[in-house]
Image (cartoon, helix red, strand yellow):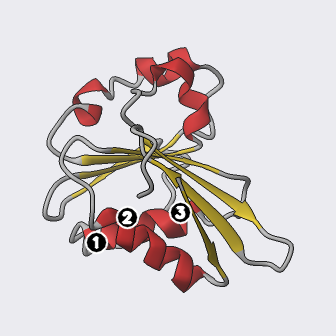
Amino acid sequence: MSEIRTQDAEETRDVGRRLGGTLLPGDIVALTGPLGAGKTVFAQGVAESLGVDEPVTSPTFTLICEYEGIMPFYHMDLYRLDTPDEFAWLGVEEMLNGNGVSLLEWSEKAGEELPDRAIHVGIELSYDGGRIITIIRSDGEAA
């Protein structure tokens, strides 16, 4: 587990870039945190590290956006889901087990449907207006 403090959006994006640079095909990043914590900013950093050239925005209403880079980047926003079954019904099995990276905002909504190998990233607001980012790999190692 590692804990990183950031003071602005660019630092949060940079942490995403650094994690993204370590990701391999089939990796899953499970993001959690309150509204406004910086989940999408973090996702933008991951996307940049994967060579995505187009703007990355939160797919709150479309649920899933696919981007092309050095490998596919699947950006999912589960905020509007009510149950883990709804996540399973999205038919994301191929994305989660394919040749790209999947990043899920509001990943806690996937419940038991989230694969155990996911890298868990929690983003919390700190008292000073910054962010506290905690990264836990499935093997318990710091990212």
- The three-letter code of the residue at mark 2 reads Leu
Quarter assignment of residue 52:
bottom left
Q: Earlier in the sequence, mark 3 or mark 2?
A: 2
Distance from disc 1 to disc 2, alpha carbons, whole Å, reads: 8 Å
Comparing 103 with 141, the one in front is 141
Q: Residue at x 83, y 80 (%)?
A: 128
Neighbour tally class for label 2: few under 14, some 14-19, many 20 plus, Cα within 10 Å:
some
Mark 2 element type: helix
User: Amino acid type of disc 3?
Assistant: Thr
Query: Which residue is located at x 39 percent, y 38 percent?
Result: 139
Q: CA distance from mark 3 to mark 2?
A: 14 Å
Q: Which mark is residue 49?
A: 1
Vertical position of residue 102 compared to residue 73: above or below? above
Name the kind of residue labelled 1 in the image.
Ser
Would residue 128 appear left or right of 111 to someone viewing this image?
right
Which residue is under mark 3? 40
> Is 55 drawn above or below residue 76 in the view shown?
below
C-alpha span from label 1 to label 3 = 14 Å
Q: What x and y, as percent, mark residue 22?
A: 27, 62
Mark 1 lies on a secondary structure that is helix
Q: Is residue 130 left or right of residue 59?
A: right
Say which residue appears at 28% left-offset and 71% top-offset: 49
In depth, the one of 30 and 36 nearer the eye is: 30
x and y, in percent, of residue 27 in the image: 28, 44
Q: Nearer the viewer, mark 3 or mark 2?
A: 2
Q: Residue at x 62, y 66 (%)?
A: 38
